[in-house]
Image (cartoon, rainbow, N blue to C red):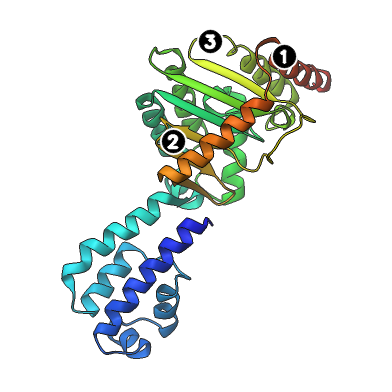
Amino acid sequence: MSTDYQQAREALGARLRELRTETGLNGKDFAGRLGWQRSKISRLENGKQTATEADVETWAQGAERPDVTDELRRTVRNLQTSYRSWRRQLSAGHRAVQEGHVVQEAQAQTIHIFESGIIPGIFQTPDYARGVLTDVSNRLGTPRDIEEGVRARMKRQETLYEPGHHFDTLIWEAALHVARCAPEAMAVQLHRLSGFIGLDTVTLGVIPLGARTSFSPKHGFWIIDEQLVVADTWSAELSLDSAEDVALYRKTWELMRESAVFDHQAHRLIDRARVRFSDLA
């Protein structure tokens, strides 16, 4: 969980504590008024649990402050926007998530991408995407609308052929060797990836294994129009829009670019991985 997110959750807890204190009730008595367990009051006030919109609505009513309901709702929505758990996002299946990416990418002009362990979704073949979405559903126990998700993910690629967009992409070489589908399908995926090199709307670089770097690969991230960073963790997707966060990720991306190779050198690294999978098929 990000430090910024936790600080925001603690700030909301402090605001809830302030409203409860104004009633003159201690935590136990306030919990009784709301019909909750005392422990829930403590967790919310100390930023140990994320409040829902229903929670803050009940809190405002219990504090006899209906005038702050909208304020508290906005705070919760901001929290949900900055930290969206994969389990919650995928509760309705993959299709809705992929369609959201379609809209976001179609509206963007420039996207800077870094991935350390996966081929970026917008460059994936159907078999590769199928393997990824199946793995995600199995791991999280979310709906298995795999084929609908694959079709929606493929639709994202239409933006690659439309003028007015540019995808400035860096991939850690290790991602080329992570098998997310059968060897023959991996070989096809890598052949497809190399085909994007030279496309007007794509700049594709590969950071070689063994390259001297001033950073560790950590997690993948996308910078949308220099205004928003979308970063993936195991459990959630983070959306960071502060100028400080965007600047930090942009600087990190530029450092990564200094270690990357492009054009025929990138082709060579991708082809080396493709041949390895072809030999395994």
Q: Quadrant of the C terminus?
A: top right
Residue 95 circle label:
2
Q: Hey, what amino acid is under mark 3?
A: Leu
Q: Is residue 17 left or right of residue 178?
A: left
Residue depicted at 39% across the width and 56% down the height: 79
Percent x, y of residue 27 = 37, 86
Residue 222 is marked as none
Label 1 vs 3, first from the N-terminus: 3
Residue bearing mark 1: 265
* Residue hosting label 3: 199
Find the distance from the CA under tag 2 to the CA under tag 1. Answer: 36 Å
> Viewer-proximal residue, 278 or 260?
260
**Height in image: 216 above or below 53?**
above
Looking at the picture, tell me which residue is in the foreground, 270 or 111.
111
Which element carries disc 2, helix, strand or loop? helix
Q: Amino acid at mark 2?
A: Arg
Disc 1 marks a residue whose amino acid type is: Gln
Q: Nearer the viewer, residue 45 or 213?
A: 213
Question: Contact (CB < 8 A) between labels 2 and 3?
Answer: no
Q: Position of residue 95 (x, y in %)?
A: 44, 36
Camera-side residue of 43 and 98: 43
* Screen quadrant of the N terminus: bottom right
Image location (x, y in percent) of residue 255: 62, 32
CB within 8 Å, label 2 to label 1:
no
Compared to residue 208, the image places residue 3 above or below, namely below
Mark-to-mark CA distance, 1 and 3: 16 Å
